[in-house]
Image: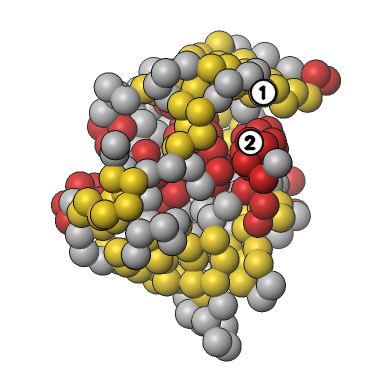
């Protein structure tokens, strides 16, 4: 029987929160068996904590947020994805701000540090959720569907299609043979250009930069729009090339689908047990992912 694992040593990250713009220092510590992944808000009186579990999800707009009492932490999906997928069952995450640092918009830095320090086997066996029936969450009007069916091993297939001539229809796949640090962790978050100004008006992406997101451009942009973008991100050399802002090169042809895969691996980890089943997701997002995790969690409590 496979045993639980934790980090062999602490790892620390610093950066800005994507939406709050707050400076963040986050240290991930080894933790005792059976404790799961827990965030501890060291900036708040009494250092309250919140477990990375599905029933603690309180918001899924532009990221996954968890809350328990006064402890609330946003944009947790990338660090949880890296820890859980790379075999870490138990970790205590000290964080001195309300949001996880966005880093470069991917989980690459997290995966690299986990690889550097390694993991340690613990005494307790891992707990699994063995899928014995079909589970489905869908939003028909948006073409969103997450389905889980019985299978001996865990696998996830993601398809994205936003009716975009630039992005097209993309797919990505994960199973135990996939090299997560090399093939999934480096894939960055993305945003459509027309969403940026709306997000700014909503008080979001205060910590965003063109270095931490792929920006998709569906239509030609005016000189006025270009000037606003340059001012927003403090750049003077932004242009459009092949439907993307030219500040970066895609790391994979299907990087957008791979990032959605990165996200769903983190969100489904909120079940707190490793899944034995096949996941098929069409246009998944944090709402669908976490609703599916909550469906599975409810099954555990019956």
Q: Residue at x 46, y 26 (%)?
A: 276
**Residue 23 in the image: above or below residue 161:** below
Q: Nearer the viewer, residue 276 or 143?
A: 276
Q: How many marks?
A: 2
Local packing at callout 2 (Cα closer than 10 Å; few below 14, some 14-19, many 20+) is many
Q: Position of residue 18 (x, y in %)?
A: 54, 56
Answer yes or no: is residue 63 visible.
yes
Q: Pick the residue in front: 17 or 58.
A: 58
Residue 73 sits above or below residue 177 on the image: below
User: In the rendered structure, are the residues bearing label 1 and label 2 in contact, judged by CB atoms less than 8 Å apart?
Assistant: yes
Residue at the limit of the structure toward the bottom, as seen here? 45
Q: Give the alpha-carbon distance from disc 1 to disc 2, as whole Å.
A: 8 Å
Instruction: Give the image location of residue 191, x and y in percent.
Output: 58, 36
| Left or right: 39 in relation to 53 | left
Asked which colour scheme the image uses, the reply is secondary structure
Please give left or right for residue 273 compared with residue 61 in the image.
left
Instruction: Name the residue tied to disc 2.
Output: 296
Say the numbered circle drawn on residue 135.
Answer: 1
The residue tagged with tag 1: helix, strand or loop?
A: strand
**Based on the displayed image, in which of its 4 quarters is residue 291 positioned?**
top right
Q: Quadrant of the C terminus?
A: top right
User: Dot 1: within a 10 Å radius of its alpha carbon, few (fewer than 14), some, or many (20 or more) residues?
Assistant: some
Farthest residue toward the right?
141
Residue at the location (74% across, 46% down)?
A: 198
Residue 46 lies in quadrant: bottom right
Rendered location of residue 229, percent (x, y): 58, 45
- Earlier residue among tags 1 and 2: 1
Q: Tag 2, which secondary structure? A: helix
User: Which mark, residue 288?
Assistant: none
- Please report the residue visible at 54 percent of the width from the left and 38 percent of the height from the top: 268
Quarter placement of the N terminus: top left
- Asked whether residue 280 appears in the rendered view, the answer is no
């Amino acid at each position: 029987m496979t045993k639980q694992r934790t980090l062999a040593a602490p790892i620390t990250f610093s950066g800005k929160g994507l939406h709050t713009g707050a400076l963040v220092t986050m240290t991930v510590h080894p933790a005792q068996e059976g404790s799961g992944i827990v965030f501890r808000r060291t900036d708040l009186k009494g250092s309250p904590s919140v477990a990375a579990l599905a029933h603690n999800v309180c918001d899924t707009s532009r990221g996954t947020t968890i809350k328990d009492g006064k402890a609330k932490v946003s944009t947790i999906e990338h660090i949880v994805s890296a820890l859980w997928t790379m075999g870490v069952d138990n970790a205590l995450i000290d964080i001195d701000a309300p949001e996880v640092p966005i880093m470069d918009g991917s989980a690459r830095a997290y995966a690299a540090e986990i690889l550097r320090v390694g993991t340690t086997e613990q005494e307790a066996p891992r707990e699994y959720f063995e899928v014995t029936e079909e589970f489905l969450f869908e939003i028909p009007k948006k073409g969103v569907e997450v389905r889980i069916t019985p299978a001996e091993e865990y696998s996830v297939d993601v398809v994205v299609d936003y009716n975009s001539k630039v992005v097209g229809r993309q797919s990505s796949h994960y199973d135990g043979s996939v090299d997560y640090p090399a093939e999934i962790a480096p894939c960055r978050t993305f945003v459509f250009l027309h969403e940026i100004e709306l997000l700014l008006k909503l008080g979001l992406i205060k910590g965003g930069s063109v270095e931490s997101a792929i920006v998709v451009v569906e239509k030609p942009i005016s000189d006025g729009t270009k000037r606003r973008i340059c001012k927003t991100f403090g750049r003077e050399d932004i242009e459009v090339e092949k439907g993307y802002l030219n500040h970066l090169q895609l790391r994979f042809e299907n990087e957008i689908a791979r990032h959605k895969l990165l996200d769903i691996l983190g969100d489904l980890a909120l079940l707190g047990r490793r899944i034995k089943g096949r996941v098929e997701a069409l246009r998944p997002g944090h709402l669908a992912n976490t609703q599916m995790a909550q469906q599975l969690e409810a099954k555990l409590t019956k």
